[in-house]
Image: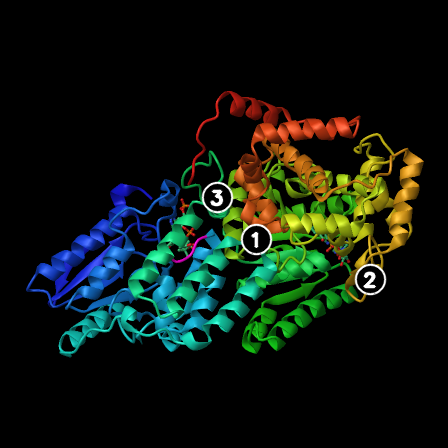
């Protein structure tokens, strides 16, 4: 946000001073904006011609909260929102917050310090601070339980979720929903309040609702959150602040308590990591060196080839966004099955109350099936999601190249094949790129957008923008085996099999990685993804001569595949399954021990959780440095987004590349060297990437202060 754009407008209309937050694009509460609001309030207070104040936001929202860029300074500068709220609460003239768009975090806290709040019907309010590893640090933890009660405060502040105006009014967080023009209604409310002749309401004067049962409510809510992220510090601090509010102590003491907790969090590594991810996600959609104002292609109608697992999931993304989809299959029965799967997924969503029947009907009405490629002729974008077989994909793409209209974009959902070869098959490679969705495609947030050697810039830019429309977090990857995510995953899975052959058990491996924070350990993950799928890819890569020249390479997964232990769907894989519950299977340890004997791998019983984490994670990060050096990813932050949005990597560490900085690059390099020695690294699995080595050297010779933002 450029400081020059920032300020608070001031005008008086009808004896009402209107203070307008003006700091595009989200009216973030930077120091300059806070100073502007403060000046406006003092001016209104001192002016006898002013009887009331309305605070409103310019542009598309009231306020997106504190300016997160300022968090790196380590302190909160004056005037802060607490000073502003204290002044408003002391004023004899009513102050009304007029909310449109969003009122989030510090923005909502500013509103809670006003005497009244009115919002448009479609306004959204919330406290997203927890998603940045902090808590509402300007009275949110103290005023919300007073206005809405302990349970609602916990729900909103611990989840960071946004609610609409209707719910906010029901909870007592806003006083009214505008029926006409927001500003006019806010002015009317302010003028009405001047005439009341009674004391003005303040949140701080209210008792905390639900204080008597607060201890149990807080314990239950916290337990639920910590089950998912036991190491997260912000939820615990939030609970302490709400507990303080409920304890009946002085409100001002509560603000001090909250501020200390806020500063501790803001200056901690978790918040730094989460802020890094917030900005990394925003940066990831930006394509460097793109011509300014490049016209984008219009995408409204979508075609999808293949109605299997991925095709159906991909289709739902577009249907959910209100875009018509034609799904094409080779045969009518496969098409019917694919469409039925989409219908039953939506029906189950209706049953669970996630969508309404009307929404389902609208979405299904946008869906058409076809077995005729001529139906692709009017599509703006066609995504192929047929079998992972180059010959089939080339045939399909050659047909698409002929039938698709000029300017249509053709995308492939391949996860392992060369996008450039597929692009050539269309005869129009400039129109082609990869759209690598993750399974289940209608749920997973990540979309890797693969730019081919000949992909036109406007095609890439169009798809990045489209990704946002279908609620995906998009990251650009260059062409290489596995793109960003699966390429890095390969080194992780490689060490998993070696460690199992050395004597670790699947349960031990999973516990170590889940202890680090991965959403799911590698063995459980492989069992869910399907051992056969992975073994099939490895066979293909071996045939191409693309695997390291050792039969021990990922030998266990291939052996499990050969034995039909295809994972959860087969009832056995790295584990055996009791329904969906994994149970340790001594048979797997025996298979691993046999392979170790066959390949001369020494069995050990001294494998620690720390070694497991280092051996799986450090080579994965090392691969990230190779990806950077080769220009496969634009930025290290892009890699972090891939892993946190697509692979269950713990966001509290900021992603693998951010974690590397936290560990220290020299330490990371040295540990890789040490692991290389320990494993007689014949295939250079642990050899530090040149970029990592250079950066580690720089770090050692020039230990500069790292940016805190
Ligand atoms: N501070 C600084 N920059 C912010 C920001 C913030 N709070 N919120 C958004 N931005 C920036 C984004 O980085 C982006 O920058 P770019 O154009 O350079 O990429 C730009 O504003 C536009 O953001 P979006 O693309 O996300 O805009 P949308 O219109 O899609 O969404 C939004 C708007 C819903 C406000 C969304 O940006 C958002 O959720 N922002 C974060 C809100 C938040 O977490 N607020 C709490 C801050 S912590 C706090 O308030 C502490 C307090 O309790 C003391
Ligand atoms: P799938 O086997 O479930 O579905 C493939 C579908 O394509 C089948 O319904 C088949 O009938 C259809 N098909 C095959 N040839 C066709 C043709 N010539 N014309 C029209 N339809 C045809 O496979 P899945 O899992 O959906 O995978 C599809 C693609 O998505 C593959 O390239 C795969 O690598 C990729 N992918 C798969 C992921 C997964 O987890 N399953 C994740 C990411 C990508």
Can you say whether 434 is above or below 11 in the image? above
- Left/right placement of residue 337 relative to residue 17 reads right
- Left/right placement of residue 32 relative to residue 149 reads left
Q: Residue at x 25, y 46 (%)?
A: 32
Can you say whether 464 is above or below 703 in the image? below
Q: Which disc, if any, is residue 646?
A: none
The N terminus - image quarter:
top left
Q: Is the magenta stretch mostly helix, strand or loop?
A: loop
Residue named by callout 3: 276
Q: Point out residue 270 in the picture as x, y percentages from the top left corner.
A: 50, 47
Toward the viewer: 334 or 272?
Answer: 272
Q: Which of marks 1 and 2 is in front?
A: 1
Q: Give the range drawn in magenta.
A: 134-138
Q: Residue at x 77, y 52 (%)?
A: 507
Q: Which disc, if any, is residue 577?
A: 2
Q: Nearer the viewer, mark 1 or mark 3?
A: 1
Residue named by callout 1: 231
Mark 1–mark 3 Cα distance, whole angstroms, equals 18 Å
Judge the density around disc 3: few (<14), some (14-19), many (≥20) Cα neighbours within 10 Å.
many
Quarter assignment of residue 167: bottom left
Q: Point out residue 682 in the picture as x, y percentages from the top left corner.
A: 80, 26
Query: Going from the N terminus, do you reach mark 1 or mark 2 first?
Result: 1
Ligand 2 lies in quarter: bottom right
- Left/right placement of residue 551 relative to residue 622 reads right
Query: Going from the N terminus, do you reach mark 1 or mark 3 first?
Result: 1
Judge the density around disc 2: few (<14), some (14-19), many (≥20) Cα neighbours within 10 Å.
some
Can you say whether 533 is above or below 244 in the image? above
Quarter assignment of residue 613: top right
């Amino acid at each position: 946000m450029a400081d020059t754009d920032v300020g608070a407008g001031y005008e008086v209309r009808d004896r009402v001073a209107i203070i307008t937050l003006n700091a595009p694009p989200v009216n973030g509460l930077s120091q300059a904006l806070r100073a502007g609001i403060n000046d406006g309030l003092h001016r209104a207070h001192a002016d006898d011609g002013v009887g009331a104040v309305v605070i409103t936001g310019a542009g598309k929202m009231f306020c997106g909260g504190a300016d997160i860029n300022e968090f790196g300074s380590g302190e909160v500068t004056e005037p802060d929102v607490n000073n502003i709220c204290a002044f408003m609460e002391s004023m004899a003239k009513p102050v009304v917050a007029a909310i449109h768009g969003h009122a989030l975090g510090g923005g909502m806290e500013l509103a809670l310090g006003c005497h009244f709040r009115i919002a448009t019907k479609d306004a959204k309010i919330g406290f997203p601070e927890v998603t940045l590893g902090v808590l509402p640090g300007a009275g949110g933890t103290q005023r919300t339980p007073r206005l809405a009660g302990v349970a609602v405060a916990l729900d909103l502040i611990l989840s960071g979720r946004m609610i609409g105006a209707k719910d906010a009014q029901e909870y007592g967080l806003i006083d009214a929903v505008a029926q006409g023009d927001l500003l006019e209604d806010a002015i009317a409310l302010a003028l009405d309040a001047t005439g009341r002749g009674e004391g003005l309401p303040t949140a701080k004067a209210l008792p905390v609702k639900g204080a008597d049962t607060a201890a149990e409510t807080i314990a239950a809510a916290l337990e639920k959150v910590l089950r998912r992220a036991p190491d997260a510090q912000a939820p615990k601090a939030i609970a302490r602040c709400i507990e303080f509010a409920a304890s009946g102590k002085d409100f001002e003491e509560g603000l001090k308590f909250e501020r200390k907790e806020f500063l501790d969090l803001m200056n901690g590594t978790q918040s730094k990591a989460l802020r890094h991810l917030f900005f990394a996600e925003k940066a990831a959609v930006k394509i460097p060196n793109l011509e300014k104002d490049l016209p984008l292609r219009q995408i409204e109608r979508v075609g999808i080839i293949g109605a299997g697992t991925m095709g159906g999931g991909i289709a739902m993304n577009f249907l959910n966004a209100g875009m018509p989809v034609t799904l094409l299959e080779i045969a009518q029965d496969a098409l019917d099955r694919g469409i039925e799967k989409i219908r039953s997924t939506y029906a189950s969503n209706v049953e669970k109350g996630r969508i309404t029947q009307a929404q389902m009907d609208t979405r299904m009405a946008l869906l058409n099936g076809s077995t005729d490629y001529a139906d692709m002729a009017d599509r703006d974008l066609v995504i192929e999601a047929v079998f992972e077989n180059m010959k089939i994909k080339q045939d399909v793409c050659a047909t698409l190249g002929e039938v698709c209209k000029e300017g249509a974009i053709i995308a492939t959902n391949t996860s392992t094949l060369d996008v450039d070869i597929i692009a050539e098959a269309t005869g129009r490679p400039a129109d082609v790129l990869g759209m690598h969705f993750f399974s289940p495609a209608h749920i997973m947030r990540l979309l890797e957008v693969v730019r081919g050697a000949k992909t036109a810039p406007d095609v890439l830019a169009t798809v990045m923008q489209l990704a946002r429309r279908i609620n995906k977090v998009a990251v650009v990857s260059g062409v290489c085996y596995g793109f960003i995510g699966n390429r890095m995953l390969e080194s992780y899975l490689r060490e998993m099999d070696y460690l199992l052959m050395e004597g670790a058990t699947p349960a031990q491996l999973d516990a170590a990685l889940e202890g680090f924070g991965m959403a799911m350990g590698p063995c459980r993950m492989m069992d869910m993804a399907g051992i056969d799928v992975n073994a099939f890819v490895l066979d293909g890569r071996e045939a191409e001569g693309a695997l390291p020249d050792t039969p021990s390479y990922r030998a266990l997964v291939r052996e499990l595949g050969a034995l039909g232990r295809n994972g959860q769907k087969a009832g056995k894989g790295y584990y055996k399954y009791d329904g969906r519950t994994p149970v340790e299977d001594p048979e797997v340890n025996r298979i691993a021990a046999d392979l170790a004997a066959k390949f001369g791998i020494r069995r050990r019983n001294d494998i620690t959780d720390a070694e497991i984490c280092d051996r799986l994670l450090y080579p994965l990060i090392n691969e990230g440095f190779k990806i950077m050096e080769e220009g496969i990813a634009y930025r290290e932050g892009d890699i972090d987004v891939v892993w946190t949005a697509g692979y269950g990597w713990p966001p509290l560490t900021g992603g693998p590349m951010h974690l590397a900085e936290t560990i220290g690059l020299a330490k990371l390099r040295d540990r890789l060297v040490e692991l290389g020695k320990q494993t007689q690294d014949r295939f250079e699995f642990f050899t530090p990437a040149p970029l990592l080595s250079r950066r580690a050297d720089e770090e050692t010779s020039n230990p500069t202060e790292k940016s805190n933002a």
